[in-house]
Amino acid sequence: MQESAGPVHVAVIMDGNGRWARERGLPRGKGHEAGADSVRAVVRACRDHGVRYLTLYAFSVENWKRPRSEVHGLMQLLRRFMDKEEHLLHEQQIRLRIMGRLEDLPKAVQKKLTRVMEDTAHYDAGQLILALSYGARTEIATAARRIAEKVRARKIDPEEIDESLFGEHLYIPDVPDPDLMIRTSGEMRLSNFMLWQLSYAELYTTPVLWPDFREKQFTEALEAYRLRDRRYGGLSTQPPKEHASC
Ligand code: FPP
């Protein structure tokens, strides 16, 4: 089987923190803490594997329904993570971006994230995109509203609305669509994550719980991706079987 190039953009649904903690008789917060260690490991691994964009589903619009104590713990963890790991972004020249309703987050977290985004905005070795208070349906509905407002203001003619123009009104339009979407903990759902952008992504699921997902597991996911035959609805790019080399 011919191997393709590695993915440029990897998106991850980090699932299984709660189960990881429960298996150890620990509170859920400990699972999220261990999950933050996996975030650090995967961010580091991206550089070694040539992954330029890493998008992590860190908090969905639905996650606000969790108990207040868990939401509070996650917000604190996010802040602590930024305090501890900001140097990693500077060392590796990685730009931090947020995708989602930043305005929903506690003011102190917004302030911290905004400051780190500004301080890393000029880096171009890679991008770490955190999906926070993110929901794909919210993103798509927001894009539709922004386009409708421009139509009303006669800045856009309805005839001009196509996939490309629509995509330009999503949260971070300059980022290429993910090539690979990884979901941990064995679930087979998209959970309202990047529904527009994942149209042609390769999907990879693993039973490994997120806190156990480290560089080794990330490398395995990238190896599986390289063996995929991406067709985008067209014909195979692989040689026919009788000519195929191993
Ligand atoms: C899903 O696991 C995970 C989350 C809702 C939160 C993800 C957060 C982290 C990995 C921690 C920190 C992140 C950053 C960016 C520093 P779950 O709690 O739904 O697990 P379960 O399905 O086993 O209960």
Image: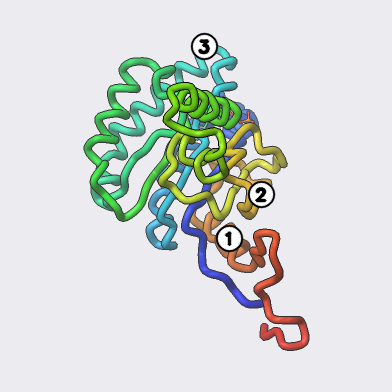
Residue located 53% across and 55% down the image: 218
Q: Position of residue 13 (x, y in %)?
A: 57, 40
Direction from residue 229 to residue 90 in the image, left or right = left
The yes-or-no answer for disc 1 within 8 Å of ligand 1 is no
Question: Quick one: 38 or 4, which is closer to the camera?
Answer: 4
Q: CA distance from mark 1 to mark 3?
A: 36 Å
The amino acid on which the numbered mark 3 sits, given as a three-letter code, is Arg
Please tell me which of labels 1 and 3 falls first in the chain.
3
Quarter occupied by the N terminus: bottom right
Helix, strand or loop under label 1: helix
The residue that label 1 is drawn on is 220
Quarter occupied by the C terminus: bottom right
Number of callouts in the render? 3
- Asked if the residue at tag 3 contacts the one at tag 1, i.e. Cβ–Cβ closer than 8 Å, the answer is no
Where is residue 162, by image quadrant? top right
Please tell me which of labels 2 and 3 falls first in the chain.
3
| 118 up-or-down from 182: above or below | above
- Kindly give the residue lying farthest to the top in the view shown: 68
Residue located 66% across and 38% down the image: 190
Helix, strand or loop under label 2: loop
Q: CA distance from mark 1 to mark 2?
A: 10 Å
The residue that label 2 is drawn on is 206
The residue that label 3 is drawn on is 68
| 229 up-or-down from 75: above or below | below
Please tell me which of labels 1 and 2 falls first in the chain.
2
Helix, strand or loop under label 3: helix
Disc sitting over residue 134 in the figure: none
Query: What colour scheme has been applied to the protein in the rendered image?
Result: rainbow
The amino acid on which the numbered mark 1 sits, given as a three-letter code, is Glu
Question: Quick one: 12 or 72, which is closer to the camera?
Answer: 12
